[in-house]
Amino acid sequence: MNAPIARLFGVVILLFALLVLFTSRWTVFEASSLNNNTLNVRTLLDELKIKRGRILAADGTVLAKSVPAPGNTWSRTYPTGRLFSQPVGFSIAAKSEAIGLEDSAGADLRGIQTGLSSIFGQLSPRPVGDDVYTTLDPKGQRSAIQALAGMHGSVVALDPSTGAVKVMYANPGYDNNNPPSSNSTTDTTFNRVTQGHYAPGSTFKIVTATAAIDSGMYTPNSVINGNSPITVSGVPLANDGGKSWGPQTLTTAMTYSINTIFAQVAEHVGRGTMTDYMKRFGFYSKPPLDYPSFQLAISQPYVTPTRAYPPASRDEDIGRIGIGEGGLLVTPLQMAMVASAVADGGTLMTPHLIDRVVDQDGRTVRTTNPTVYSHVMKSSTAAEVTRMMEKVVEEGTGTAVQLGGISVAGKTGTAQIGPNGSNLTQPAFVAFAPADHPKIAIAVMIDESNGGFGGSVAAPIAKTVLQTLLADGA
Amino acid sequence: MSARNRELLGLIPASLLVTAGFAGVFIQRSNALSNVSLTYGALFLGLCIAAHIFIRFTLPRADPYMFPLVAVLASFGLVMVYRINPTLARQQAQWFVLGLFLFAATIILLRDYRKLERYRYIIVLISLGLLVLPRLPGIGYSANGAYLGVRIPGLFVFQPAEFAKIGLVIFLASYLRDTRQVLVQGGRRFLGITFPPLKQFGPVIVIWGLAMATLVVLSDTGSSVMFYGGLLAMLYVATNRLSFVVIGLIAAGIGFWYLGTHIPHIHARVETWLHPLNPTLYHAPLGSYQVANSIFAQAAGGLFGQGFGQAQLTLPGGGPLLPFPQTDMIYAVITDELGLFGAVAVLITYLLFVARGFKVALLARDSFSTLLAVGLSAMFALQVFVIVGGVTRVIPLTGVTLPFISYGGSSIVANLVLLALLLLVSDRARRPE
């Protein structure tokens, strides 16, 4: 009976080999797909057991922290609530939901949780993540809330020399301790600063002026006929109040926001060059912010609110785009980047929210070094555009933002929205200050006003925030 | 070195394992090494040495590796169960002590185990009676739709199938010893296949019927597969006729196919086996939640595991993430915490034990002894295959225990009796004439 016993043992070995094979299948070959299966809640539970690091403002104010929850888990609480809900966002690990920095800085907040473990497991009983220090300024943020006074709209301020985001606030917002349901009518997690599409109106003339001067086709003193109306792409275009300005310099056209002149300039500069400069400013791609990609919208001309024109499309009305119309839709962040590029001598710094990441022992793990996003224009062009923008505030449409003692360079915008003949506008103001040595670039864009202008509605808000930030030594 | 000294040395790794294991669990629990782990290790070592001294005096020539292998498995099991539920581990340790007493009793009472042959029909009747017990009203109870256990209120709960398997092996070994010649020579060839003579093959068919009945009446697929596989293994060794095994497998295949497609709850088991990640099945009551989480747990383990005590077994709300972690699913917990390497180490330990069992069968000088050793070893191997195969989705999941490791008094006691029988056969085989 020896031979059958040996063969029987062979069968047993085969059966055990099958067990080893299948164990390997689950532990190795199909492990990643199983770990990522939506039915598998283990990854989620692991997440709940991690004490995520804090999120802090530039001055050390705690914006987000972890508090113990039942079952050896942690939950998040946000001491500043709606004041910082848009940049910070929220994280609900149990639902696998996160937006804002809670999402984009997730890897830092969770810390380095490697898969390596010994037979005794990790000797640290509970995994702890790193603290994320942001560039946000609580005083500036508070002044934005106060200045908006409940009006729906966005305020975003950057440090032009580094790209650090100082203020990011929009109405309506929400309390991230208690995120609104999707059908809430009063609160929303939609961040207008990075996701909202506004008609830039005349604030876009900064871009047109930059393209015109930097390409060498115009100087600030080039004289263009400012009569009204003129025909642009087969459709008549009039100046505000139908006023015919006659021959004027480009600087004057900027100061008084003369549409017909800028439309002609944009048409003369041409689609290719205009598009090229827009791309340098960051249009046509998602802003390079350390923020969740799904919360960043692209600024460019749109055929419909959801369908964009291809870059430099023959179908787009470049003359109207040159004055911020023609289907052009922008985010407030993009317009702040425009101001920032001019302010920083033509160099656009990559905007960022995270200043540094610090571990639980106080060691700095990572610091965000300011990086150049693009060289938009020559510094001489930047100086000339700055001078033109200063004139806007000194004697043009933006006098409401005069700070007294500190020179401000800005540009107003008042886009007509709603049906023809309606009085509805989207007032906007884009600026930086001090003009000679810029510390803050700001964009204020208001959702809707009944006949209000950029200079009368948006500029005063920008003024308040600028004053606060500059007084704060920004 | 003498066999017994080798056995003694073999116990050292078992004791180190239990000490290191408890130390691991304590470190994980309280972040401090407690001397309780050393106490546990010392106690376990003491028990094993007592058992070793007993073997030294009663069965001096018995296989020296089997007891240490069992000690390794049992100590590992104790640590795993402790890590899952300390209260259950204490009970498990008590069962282990009781099992050692029964182990000793078996060796003393059955010094000449061949006298079992005289009682073979009584033994088989008792075994069959045991199998039916869980279906009896009042004392039987079911888990997961299968009738697996008997509960004597206020006393204890036990799983008769664990003991029935030993009785059935004793009966078959004895019966096949008598009839093997007739089965081989009386066979008729038909279509080039040798069919066994019906008269002598009758009882074998009865066993086949019983296996199927166990499946239908008790829904105990696991034991059914185990019994039937054990039967075929013994039949094959007794007759050396592959054709008998093939006929047996075909018959079983037809039986399982019919039951798998026509008995709703067995069909449901097959469905959860084939499609565990189907969301509808996953969320259905008694659906694929257990199987799916078994493979999720193994995936979480990866190559090296998450570390002792790191597997997630419960949901934050208190519900089970991995149902039955201490019994059916203990292999998934092992894989989760110790990874593929740990799981394979456990499987190799089992394989070594089975190899020693077959070695005992090879050395035995009479057919009854050989068949007894083959049957017990094959049954043991199949039990491991059925439960680990179920957990790893090689076959549909059915509830049998992982011998010596799973929590369960009946399992540990019955398997220690199984070990006693193998050691008895081994000692006699090596005894000089």
Image (cartoon, coloured by chain):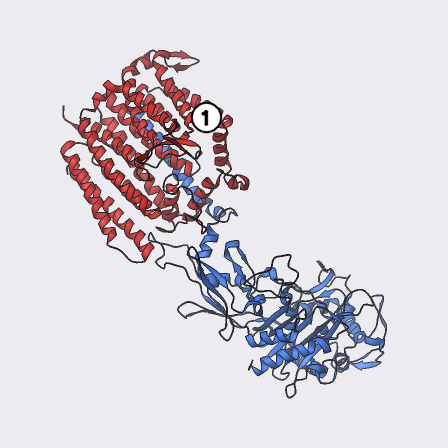
Chain colours: A blue, B red
For the question of whether residue A211 can be seen, the reply is no
Q: Is A6 placed left or right of A400 in the picture?
A: left
* Chain on which label 1 sits: B
Q: Note whether A416 is above or below B320 in the view shown.
A: below
Q: Secondary structure at mark 1?
A: helix
Crowding at mark 1 (Cα within 10 Å: few <14, some 14-19, many 20+): some
Q: Nearer the viewer, residue B139 or B42?
A: B139
Residue at the outermost bottom position:
A405
Above or below, comparing residue A423 to residue B62 in the picture: below
> Residue A235: where, in percent of width, then height?
85, 66
The picture places residue A230, in percent across and down from the top left corner, at 85, 72
State left or right for residue A267 relative to residue A58: right
Which image quadrant is residue B141 in? Answer: top left
For the residue marked with disc 1, what is the amino acid? Answer: Phe
Above or below for B148 versus A60: above
Name the residue beneath numbered marker 1.
B256
Where residue A127 appears, as percent x and y from the top left, is 41, 59
Residue B205 visible (yes or no): yes
Q: Residue at x 21, y 24 (%)?
A: B113
Q: Quadrant of residue A67?
A: bottom left
Q: How many numbered dots are placed on residues in this image?
A: 1
Image quadrant occupied by the C terminus of chain A: bottom right
Identify the image quadrant of the N terminus of chain A: top left
Q: Nearer the viewer, residue B375 or A86?
A: A86
Q: Which x, y percent locates residue B17? A: 26, 47
